[in-house]
Amino acid sequence: MTTAILSALPEEQASLIARLERAQRLTHAGRSFWKGELCARPVLLALSGIGKVAAATTATALIEHFGVARIVFTGVAGGLGEGVGVGDVVVAESFLQHDMDASPLFPRWEVPGYARTRFDCDARLSALLQDAARHCLSGADRLPELEDGVHRVHQGLVASGDRFVSGAQEALRLRESLGAAGHAVLAVEMEGAAVAQVCLDYSVPFAAIRTISDRADDTAHVDFPVFIQTVASRYAEHMVLALMRA
Ligand code: ADE
C-alpha cells in the first residue's frame, strides 16, 4: 500500500528526498516522482506544482498511473483564522475553492456537478496527522528550529484558490465573506481543494497538513519565502516521518 506524499514546492520536499531509502526517480506527465521507502513503508514523493490545475494533474497521475492507496499533502499556507499564527499547523478537515463562483446558476462556492461546497478529508488519516503534528510541536520531539513560544495545531476548513493572498484587506474580505456563509476558514493555499476533489472522484483517502508561513497580509510576500527557506522543509520531514511510523 503506497502512500503518496505531495508537496507544492521543491524546498518543502527536499528533506523527504534526503531521507528516502531505495530512492528511484521516475518521470511521468512532465513531472518527477520519487519512489522509495520511509520508515520501511512504500512511498511516492511528488510535487503538486502551484495552483489547482497542476495539483489536480499530479493527483490524477498518482492515482491512475502509480496506483497509490492514499495521498497526504504537506506544505505551507497563509493563516486567515483568528489566532492562526506563523509556525502554527493546520490539519485540514475539509477544503473549499474560494475562487469558485458559478452564481447565480449555482450557490457561491458550490462546485457544479458535485452539489457541494466542501470536500472532506479522510478522518482516520487526518487523526494520524494531528498526532504527528502534536509530537513535532511539543514534548521531546519538538522541532529545534521552532522559535520560543507556543505553536498550536488547528483542525478545520482550508480554502484554496489560484491566487497568492497578500493583502490584509483581501484576507479580511475572504474570511468575512466565507464566515458569513457559515464557512469559518482557518487558512488559505492554492492546491488542496483540487486534490480533495480528485480523491473524491476516485474514492482515495486524502489528508493535508499545512504549516502557516504568513498571515496572507501585506507582508505575506516577504514572510512566505523566508519561511520556505528556513523551516518548511524540516516541518514536512518531521511530520511525515511521524505519520509513517504510526
Ligand atoms: N501559501 C502560503 N501562503 C499563502 C498565501 N498567502 N496565499 C495563498 N497561498 C499561500
Image (cartoon, helix red, strand yellow):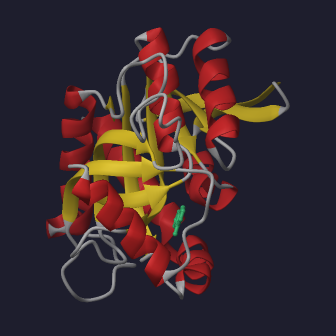
The single residue placed furthest to the left in the displayed view is: 139
The single residue placed furthest to the front in the displayed view is: 104
Q: Is residue 31 above or below residue 168?
A: above
Residue 194 image offset from top left, x and y in percent: 53, 34
Residue 223 image offset from top left, x and y in percent: 54, 83
Q: Residue at x 30, y 69 (%)?
A: 88
Q: Is residue 49 above or below residue 196?
A: below
Tell me the quarter of the image containing the N terminus. top left
Q: Is residue 201 visible?
A: yes
Q: Residue at x 27, y 31 (%)?
A: 125
112 displayed left or right of 244: right
Q: Nearer the viewer, residue 63 or 192?
A: 192
Residue 11 image offset from top left, x and y in percent: 64, 61
Q: Is residue 82 above or below residue 94?
A: below
Q: Quadrant of residue 106?
A: top left
Q: Is residue 30 above or below residue 69?
A: below
169 displayed left or right of 163: left
